Image (cartoon, rainbow, N blue to C red):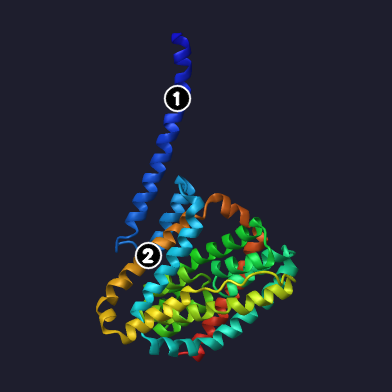
Amino acid sequence: MQKLKSGTNPKQSKDKILDRTITTREVIFLLAFVFCLSPLITPPIALFMGLIIAQFVGHPYLHLNHKATHLLLQISVVGLGFGMNVNNAMKAGKEGILFAVISIIGTLVIGFFMGKLLKIERKTSYLISAGTAICGGSAIAAISPVIKAEEKQISVALGTIFILNSIALVLFPLIGHQLDLSQNQFGLWCAIAIHDTSSVVGAASKYGAEALEIATTVKLARALWIIPVVFLSMILFKNKNSKLKIPYFIGLFVFSMMANTYITLVQEYSSYLVAIAKAGLTVTLFLIGCGLSKKVLQSVGIKPLLQGVVLWILISTVALWMVMYLAR
């Protein structure tokens, strides 16, 4: 009888060890999450912390990560609107529209031919091109159901975009300072050449307040191009029964800008709302880093990554030339 009890102990012991491992992973994640709310942690550091957790600890709530980052990013962007002025935003939007049209059309066309050349699966190639052309993960999320993309194709496209976003978040401010770009130039460049809104805002906020305002406004105006591109996708992939997803948070962003511009009471508390929004953005980038597990990185593959890198370098170089010589 004693032997039977001792025989059950190893299994019970393993279960307890497993429970402790899961608990430890959750504790590490939650401590890092809270630490990201500190003003000491910048967006690039938060992203790097997330990457470390993804590779060596593991995300304990990975199944909730996509929804959490999506919602938190939208809330943060709306909050940033409370630190912006409508008149300045309209001026920035007008200046960025020419860059947007040229870069979006050019990226989609070049991406199409690159996909053919590298023999990348058609839907994967199209998602990478659209994500690079407009607003990264948001564009991929909107277009995927329209073209009926499979989970593997979506994962590869998102993995490619997020890897390049991580690099851009650190690299762009360094290049901007090296080339002595103005706040206006850097804001425009970020909005055009960096895929995801989270990384655009993260890089621009590190460069300066004016760059942040311009980058956020131009990027969100650029996000509206999701609508015509979704319709284009329906035609190209012959799927007219799909539903169009409109990014409603952009309307809330405009509302928050108007409130900050015209309502005195809102102006008194706008600095606090912006500080909360920036903290939310930092946490968003931490969660994005946590989602870049080894499995996601390995699923990307050489050819899709090559397409993403080439498109990104092309759009970054052309956009940089345009803002340096056509913008002040």
Q: Is residue 63 above or below residue 14?
A: below
Q: Position of residue 134 (x, y in %)?
A: 57, 75
| Quarter in which the C terminus is drawn | bottom left
**Res. 300 mark:** none
Q: Is residue 100 above or below residue 42?
A: below
Q: Residue at x 54, y 72 (%)?
A: 135
Q: Residue at x 44, y 15 (%)?
A: 6
Q: Mark 1 points at which residue?
A: 12
Q: Nearer the viewer, residue 220 or 55?
A: 220
Q: Name the residue under label 2.
A: 280
Q: How far apart, in angstroms, are the residues tagged by discs 1 and 2?
A: 41 Å
Left or right: residue 123 versus residue 2 is: right
Q: Position of residue 191 (x, y in %)?
A: 49, 78
Q: Which of the two discs, 1 and 2, labels the residue nearer the N terminus?
A: 1
Q: Residue at x 37, y 64 (%)?
A: 280
Q: How crowded is mark 1: few (under 14 residues within 10 Å), some or many (20 or more)?
A: few
Instruction: Check disc 1 and give the amino acid type.
Output: Gln
Q: Is residue 179 above or below residue 159?
A: below
Is residue 170 at all visible to an observer of this figure? no
Instruction: Check disc 2 and give the amino acid type.
Output: Gly
Q: Position of residue 313 (x, y in %)?
A: 58, 73
Is residue 165 at all visible to an observer of this figure? yes
Q: Would you identify the image quadrant in which residue 101 lies?
A: bottom right
Q: Would you identify the image quadrant in which residue 133 lies?
A: bottom right
Point out the residue furthest to the top here. 1
Q: Is mark 2 on a helix, strand or loop?
A: helix
Q: How crowded is mark 2: few (under 14 residues within 10 Å), some or many (20 or more)?
A: many
Q: Where is residue 235 in the image (x, y as percent from the top left)?
A: 72, 75
Q: Residue at x 56, y 83 (%)?
A: 100
Q: Which of 310 and 229 is in front in this view?
A: 229
Left or right: residue 150 versus residue 21 is: right
